[in-house]
Image: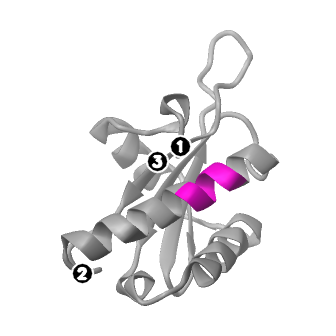
Amino acid sequence: MLPAEHRVTDASTFSEVVRRGTRTSRPTLVVHRWTDTRQDSGTRGPVRAGFVVSKAVGGAVVRNRVKRRLRHLVAAQIRSGAWEDGTVLVVRARPAAADADSARLSADLERAGLDRAVAR
């Protein structure tokens, strides 16, 4: 489970990350990432992540399953230190994520973290 301090829940943060951040695309997901450097104290906040899984992915049961898998995988990457502090992620699932197993989602998420992101 993703602790509350690592969640993105407000729409303004979602849209800011998508608008200002960089995008990396994989077959099962798209990762938008932005490092929040606006902190006045000089210290960056924790890594935060939000998820977008549209009806194009599938019905409610499928969408919730995909979200659970993605939350679990992102939480594991946060614990391992894969992202620097202050990074805000928006992970958008593509329709192929519905049929992908957890290993495939994990590989695509890891690749998205390593690939050079495309500036928007």
* Foreground disc of the pair 3, 1: 1
In the image, residue 70 above or below residue 39: below
Q: Are marks 3 and 1 in contact (CB under 8 Å)?
A: no
In the image, the segment drawn in magenta is 72-76
Q: Earlier in the sequence, mark 3 or mark 1?
A: 1
Q: Earlier in the sequence, mark 3 or mark 2?
A: 3
Asked whether residue 82 is in view, the answer is yes
Residue beneath label 3, please?
17
What amino acid is found at the position of numbered circle 3 in the picture? Val
Q: Nearer the viewer, residue 32 or 102?
A: 102
Q: CA distance from mark 3 to mark 2?
A: 25 Å
Magenta-colored segment: predominant secondary structure: helix
In the image, residue 50 above or below residue 28: above
x and y, in percent, of residue 23 in the image: 55, 65
Sort mark 3 into few (<14), some (14-19) or many (20+) by Cα contacts within 10 Å.
many
Residue at the spot 19% in from the left edge and 77% down from the top edge: 59
Q: Are marks 2 and 1 in contact (CB under 8 Å)?
A: no
Compared across the picture, whether 90 is left or right of 106 comes to left
* Foreground disc of the pair 3, 2: 2
Residue beneath label 2, please?
58
Residue at the spot 49% in from the left edge and 87% down from the top edge: 100
Which dot marks residue 2? 1
Compared across the picture, whether 90 is left or right of 34 comes to left
Q: CA distance from mark 2 to mark 1?
A: 23 Å
In the image, residue 73 above or below residue 39: below
Q: Earlier in the sequence, mark 2 or mark 1?
A: 1
SS for callout 2 = loop
SS for callout 1 = loop
x and y, in percent, of residue 78 in the image: 70, 46
What amino acid is found at the position of numbered circle 1 in the picture? Leu
